[in-house]
Amino acid sequence: MTLSQRQRIFTKNIAELICYAYGYGIELTFGHAWRSLEEQKRLKAEGKSQTLKSLHLDRLAVDFNFFIGNDLTYDYDKIKPLGDFWVSLHPDNRWGGDFNKDGKKNGFVDTPHFEMKRK
C-alpha cells in the first residue's frame, strides 16, 4: 500500500472519529496535523515529543483539542472512549493515550494524539 493510500484511509477514519466524538458530546478543534521536520525537532528538544520520526511528518497523525460544554479538557478518562473507538476503526490505528495498548494510563500518555502506523 502506498503512503497516499494510507493517508486516504487515515483521513476517512479521522472523519469517522470526528462524527463519533460529536455524537458522544465532545466537540473538537484541530491541534497539530502536519508538521515540518524543523517543528518536530523543536518539539522533541522541548520534551513535547518522543521521536523525530513522528507520523505527523507523513500526514498520518493528528492532535485534537477536546471540548465538553465550553471546557477544554485532555482528561484521559473523558477522552478514552474516543481512543477506544479510534483503534476499533483499523488495526494500524493507535491512540496516544494508550501507546502501550494495555488499556491503562501509563508510559508516555498523549491523549490528543491519533495516528495510523506506517507500513
Image (spheres, rainbow, N blue to C red):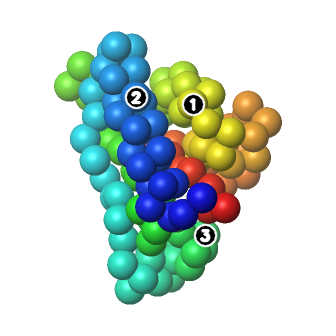
Q: Is residue 119 above or below residue 38?
A: above
| Residue drawn at (34%, 13%) of the image | 23
Which of these two is toward me, 55 or 68? 55
State the SS at label 3.
loop
On the image, the x and y values in percent for residue 34 come to 35, 65
State the SS at label 2.
helix
In the image: residue 93, left or right of residue 13: right
Marks 1 and 2, how far apart in space? 9 Å
Marks 1 and 3, how far apart in space? 25 Å
What residue type is disc 3 on?
Gln
Depth check, mark 3 against mark 2: the one in front is: 2
| Residue drawn at (73%, 34%) of the image | 104
| Residue drawn at (40%, 28%) of the image | 16
State the SS at label 1.
helix
Q: Which residue is mark 2?
A: 16
Do residues under tags 1 and 2 come within 8 Å of each other at their CB atoms? yes
